[in-house]
Image (spheres, grey):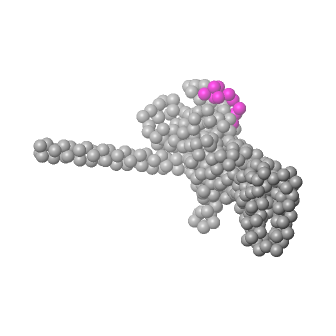
Amino acid sequence: MIVRQFLQWVRAARPGERAEATSALARAYLHSDLSADDLAAAEGAMIMLLDDPSPLVRRAMADVFASAQKAPRVVVQALAADQFDVAQPLLENSPLLSDDDLIDLIATGNTETQAAIAGRPLLSRPLGAAIAEVGSAEACLILLENSDACLALFSVDRIVERFGHLAAIRENLLERDDIPMRTRQSLLSTLSKTLAHFVTARQWLGSDHAEDAAREACEKATVALAADTPYEEIGALVTHLRESGQLTAGMILRALLSGNVVLFEEALSELSGVAIDRVTRYIHDKNISGFSALYRKASLPEMAYPAFREALSALREGVLVGEQGGAARLKRRMVERVLAACVVMRDDSMVSLVALLRRFAVEAAREEARMFCDDLVAEGDYYDAMYVAELAAVEMRLVA
């Protein structure tokens, strides 16, 4: 019997020779017309070779069985649990490893093992969830880059929660077109916290100052993000903001002063529990009493109420007509009007509100100046191009 001869020879052979012979035996098992007895003997020999001291021998079997459907399952499972250099081809491809097998390997394996599994073709949703939950950052990045992976949204959210502070993961997610806006906002929030910690660690700002600056930057980015959010996703985005503690009076006021009425309405509906159609009626009703009751039901701070009331009055009077920039940025005329009204009625309880409005006013003025300069440069480029074209036309007439 050929297997008996193989076993007698292999005991005295060198590692390289044993590896070559083992590869031949594995190929014969898969592709030769062996009898049932020979198949059983070959399987027994390969099980014995799992204990070979040379990883070359075990890797030889792994290479042959990497994509094979007919390989001995017990051999594949043992090799997959071997050191990474042996297990790699099976972790990456073997169809004989079940999701349960692979989940166990993800939980107990190192970064290399997790990364190899994360790149498997047709990766199932349970495997994606396991990698998102316990996998390393490298494995999660490979998972996100695997176009064959079936990845649930809750797994993406878990990756954001664990590794959203890492630039490579954040950039990958922001480039995807299948990520909902609430997940994108989570990335913005994580980034703002990362920047605050970075600034504080280098003692560029005090921790409170850095956190305030990062929070306002995140609120600004969130309002801009909401301006690009499809209407049907706004409700989910607002719910996420409330659940994560980000749906503050400052953010809601920023939305209103940016002309983002949809975000403003959804925020009040979320906080008050009042249906969105009723919220819309209260906001656009000239009688302020309905909005006043809605505002208090939403448990927004009393000291900020005058700012919201004045902003709504300006909105109803059409102060936003002709404003540029969409609903993504603060509107200067709106902000300055609200600031002036709050300064007149200011008392000790409104100091922080007035300070916030002054920062809004500076930001709105800077944004307006930037847009003006951009338009001016664009206009200059246009006239320069027209001049060059006209000059070329004159030259052509002279030549003719």
* Residue 347 seen: no
Q: Is residue 218 above or below residue 282?
A: below
Horizontal side of 398 relative to 96 (left or right) equals: left
Q: How many marks?
A: 0
Horizontal side of 17 relative to 348 (left or right) equals: right
For the C terminus, which image quadrant?
A: top left
Horizontal side of 211 relative to 39 (left or right) equals: left
Q: Is residue 75 above or below residue 368?
A: below
Question: Picture coordinates of residue 293 (x, y %)?
Answer: 67, 30
Q: Which residues are magenta?
A: 271-280
Question: Picture coordinates of residue 241 (x, y %)?
Answer: 66, 43
Q: What residue appears at the point 37 percent right and 48 percent down from the top-left corner?
A: 373
Q: What residue appears at the point 65 percent right and 46 percent down from the top-left corner?
A: 148
Q: What residue appears at the point 54 percent right and 43 percent down from the top-left corner?
A: 224
- SS majority, magenta: helix
Q: What residue appears at the point 62 percent right and 36 percent down from the top-left corner?
A: 233
For the N terminus, which image quadrant?
A: bottom right
Q: Nearer the viewer, residue 72 or 250?
A: 72
Question: Picture coordinates of residue 341 (x, y %)?
Answer: 52, 40
* Residue 31 seen: yes
Horizontal side of 61 relative to 336 (left or right) equals: right
